[in-house]
Amino acid sequence: RILVDEVWGPDVTAQDFNVYATPAAIAQYYNFPLPIELSAPSIALVETGLDQPNLLEALNAYRQQLGLAPMTPAQFQLIGATNVAPNDLGETALDISVLAGVAPNSAQYLYGSASATASEIGNFQAYQNAYFDSTRNPEILSSSFIYFTSMTANSPFQRAWQDLFIDGMLSGVS
């Protein structure tokens, strides 16, 4: 408010400005290393709560606002654990919308994970599904979740998580 008063006067408020923090603007601000034109062919996301009606339609409406071409169902797929109840749509929406802006030419494959029952795909398996998906072959994996902090140091479980990321590297997914 002080800056606004000094530059534009006391009668101007934040509502007088149309500020759009698009993913491309954020990428430019943080100096992402690659230009948008060099998008990877496909990006894997490990997400929870993928049972969201009209998720592709909502993403395409957002892409239209950014001046981007719509994604096809082949370019945007939900893989595994799609029947779980929504967990954190805000996080999922953030992840897919940022990718839409910073890698608009890349397919997005969301690998579902859930931990409510044994019949659902767990986080570990969701990573495996992305790493070893020979049909879609994602080159990049993104996940906002921190699973490894729940492991006891030097336990077999911690070792399994460490080995899982080595598997990812060896499979060519960064």
Image (tube, grey):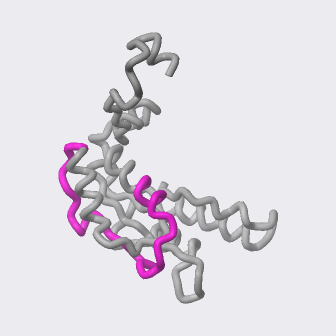
Instruction: Say if the magenta span includes residue 86.
Output: yes
| Residue at 50%, 22% in the rendered image | 1
- Identified at 32% across, 72% down, the residue is 53
Q: Position of residue 172 (x, y in %)?
A: 46, 59
Residue 55 visible in rendering: yes
Q: Position of residue 88 (x, y in %)?
A: 50, 64
Q: Measured from the top left, where is residue 36 in percent x and y?
A: 31, 40
Q: Is residue 92 magenta?
A: yes
Observer-nearest of 8 and 142:
8
How many circles with numbers are drawn on the protein?
0
Front position in the image: 100 or 58: 58
Apparent side of residue 35 relative to residue 3 in the rendered image (left or right): left
Using the image, determine if residue 109 lies above or below residue 104: below
Residue 150: quadrant of the picture = bottom right
Is residue 173 shown to the viewer in this render? Answer: no
* Prevailing secondary structure of the magenta residues: loop
Q: What residue lies at 31% left-to-right and 32% top-to-bottom? A: 18
Which of the two residues, 159 or 46, is positioned nearer the viewer here? 46
Read off the magenta span.
66-95
